[in-house]
Image: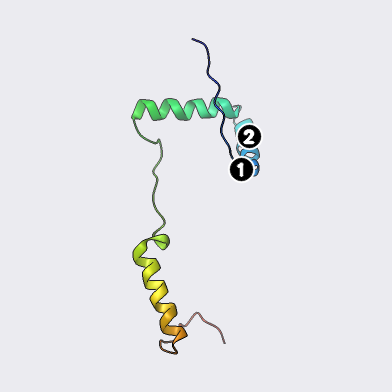
Amino acid sequence: MKASTLTMRIDPVLKEQAEELCEEMGLTLSTAYTMFLKAMVRTRSIPFQITADPFYSKKNQTYLAESIAELDAGRGEEHELIED
């Protein structure tokens, strides 16, 4: 079977870091990506857990916006972590 070429855009610093890590493991970035795709096909899933950061949830962002509005209106209490 003839190999296909995959073209993708990626942050150059991230690419360099990944290439360096792969080199330390005796791999090429191409080999590592092939391993990832094979694991994805074999498990029919992304082969690692993906979770959302709760900070960016709609509920938390609404809470933060309301808290900021309260402080801007002169209401609310100073948090113990806020220094004078």
Q: How many marks?
A: 2
Task: Please provide percent x and percent y for residue 11.
Answer: 61, 43
**In this picture, residue 10 sits left or right of residue 36:** right
Picture quarter with the C terminus: bottom right
Q: Residue at x 53, y 15 (%)?
A: 3
- Residue 69 found in image quarter: bottom left
Considering only vertical position in the picture, is 7 above or below 81?
above
The front one of 44 and 24 is 44
At mark 1, the secondary structure is loop
Q: Residues within 10 Å of mark 2 (few under 14, many from 20)?
A: some
The residue at 50%/79% (across/down) is: 81
Local SS, label 2:
helix
Amino acid beneath label 1: Asp
Q: Is residue 49 left or right of residue 1?
A: left
Tell me whether the residue at label 2 lies in contact with that at label 1, contact meaning CB atoms closer than 8 angstroms: no
Amino acid tagged 2: Glu
Q: Which mark is residue 19?
A: 2
Task: Of the two numbered discs 2 and 1 on the same chain, state the one appearing first in sequence.
Answer: 1
Per the rendering, the mark at residue 11 is 1
In the image, taking residue 44 as reference, residue 26 lies left or right, namely right
Q: Position of residue 82 (x, y in %)?
A: 52, 81
Measure how far apart labels 2 and 1 are at the Cα level.
Answer: 12 Å
Q: Residue 53: x, y in percent?
A: 42, 56
The foreground one among 31 and 57 is 57
Residue 65 vs 6, above or below: the answer is: below
Of the pair 27 and 52, the residue shown nearer to us: 52
Residue at the spot x=54%, y=26% of the render? 6
Residue visible at 57% across and 26% down in the picture: 30
- Foreground disc of the pair 2, 1: 1
